[in-house]
Image (spheres, coloured by chain):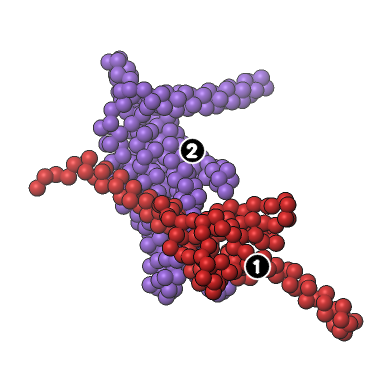
Amino acid sequence: MSGGLEKTGHHYFSLIEAVGRMGLFLLQCLFRAATPPVKLYPVVQQIHFIGARSSWVVVTAGLFTGMVVALQFYDTLVRFGSVDLLGSAVALSLIRELGPVITALMVTGRAGSAICAEIGIMRISEQIDALECMGIDPYRFFLTPKLLAGLVAVPVLTILFDLAGLVGGWFVGVVLFGVGEGTYVQGLRGGIEWNDVAMGLVKSIVFGGLIVWFCAAKGYFLHYERAGAFGPEGVSRVTTNAVVLSSVSVLFADYLIGSLML
Amino acid sequence: MKRISIEFVVGLFLIAGLVGFCYLAVSLGGVRVGQDSYLLTARFVSASGLKKDAEVELAGVAVGTVTAIRFDPKTFEAVVDLAIPRDARIQEDAIASIRSTGLIGGKFVKITAGGSERILTPGDEILETESSISLEELISKYIFESSEKGSPDPLE
């Protein structure tokens, strides 16, 4: 009986430890970002990987999301004879909610998992230990650039998603269902205020940070995971955890920011 | 042909983001970039339902915004500041009225042109005003007035 209690206690103990490690990881990265030397080129490389190479996926996702949102809203609004609200409805739902969230989920799946697996493999093949032996700071060398790139790339991707979504909504509303071109565009202009754009922007910056933070930290601290997980199995387990954790935290943060900024 | 460098792709990506952001913020979000306007005030018995940043319509076109709504404790009236574009000249006897865009729509300020020669200057007050019309009040007025007149009550 005391064994079970000890086990439970140990479990929570290590959970709190893990939270502390993640927090310290973020502080270390932010400290490196705030103090020179910050090398720009690794950041550019990471923006290329996280951002530029995700653009097609994100734009495609945005296009279809905008189309399906317009389809659903049209079907509902036409019953009330309020099709003139279509533009506002599509734009508001895209810019406030769907843009930041779906982009963050796409980035988690495409870049977040890759970041976690890459760092995890560096950890199990002892490359990180090698760096430390040579006196190279792993945070400055490859972790901080990833975090900075996430903070820049995810907002840009979100904006591309929003624009693609508005075009998709225009295609379904105006071209397929024959809503007036001016009605749709006027709805976009009238429905959106600076507040909505700012909310989407804040959300996407926070999401970018969260994704890279969780995915990088999970891979980096692979060796602290439960025993027997070191090796390829450990990488796969830690990557799954990282994707789940960052997706859930994105949705949680989405609600939190939404309720704070509305 | 030179191979396209990472820097070029990233630059393109960031520029696309910046341009998109400017479009969202300025064109759709309505961040006004140095719009030339002047302020007029108007007093209403009731500004119920009117919000800051509501539109001001001239001839049915949304040209200005409501910049502030205050309560004047002396006269017990609502004082509303209206930002009007500089090239729109409002006559002294113009009428400012609070209207709603539909049964469930928001409120806006409608300015009906007057016929006077004198043009209002910045800071002046529009003297002729009409307060917001509450649909609920109209309905209740209709119901109670008709029952007071002794018309047959449909429930009896």
Q: Chain of mark 1?
A: B
In the rendered image, which residue does mark 1 sit on? B130
Q: Nearer the viewer, residue A168 or B20?
A: B20
> Which numbered dot is residue A245?
2
3D distance between C-alphas at marks 1 and 2: 57 Å
For badge 1, the amino acid type reads Glu
Q: Residue at x 31, y 26 (%)?
A: A38
Q: Quadrant of residue A51?
A: top left
Asked if residue B144 lies left or right of residue B34, the reply is right
**Is the residue A47 above or below the residue A30 in the image?**
below
Q: Residues within 10 Å of mark 1 (few under 14, many from 20)?
A: some
Specify the label residue B68 is tagged with: none
Q: Which secondary structure, mark 2? A: helix
Residue B7 on image: x %, y %: 22, 40
Query: Label 2 amino acid?
Result: Leu
Question: What is the display colour for chain A?
Answer: purple
Residue A105 seen in the current view: no
Residue B61 at what x, y percent from top left? Answer: 48, 69
Chain displayed in red: B
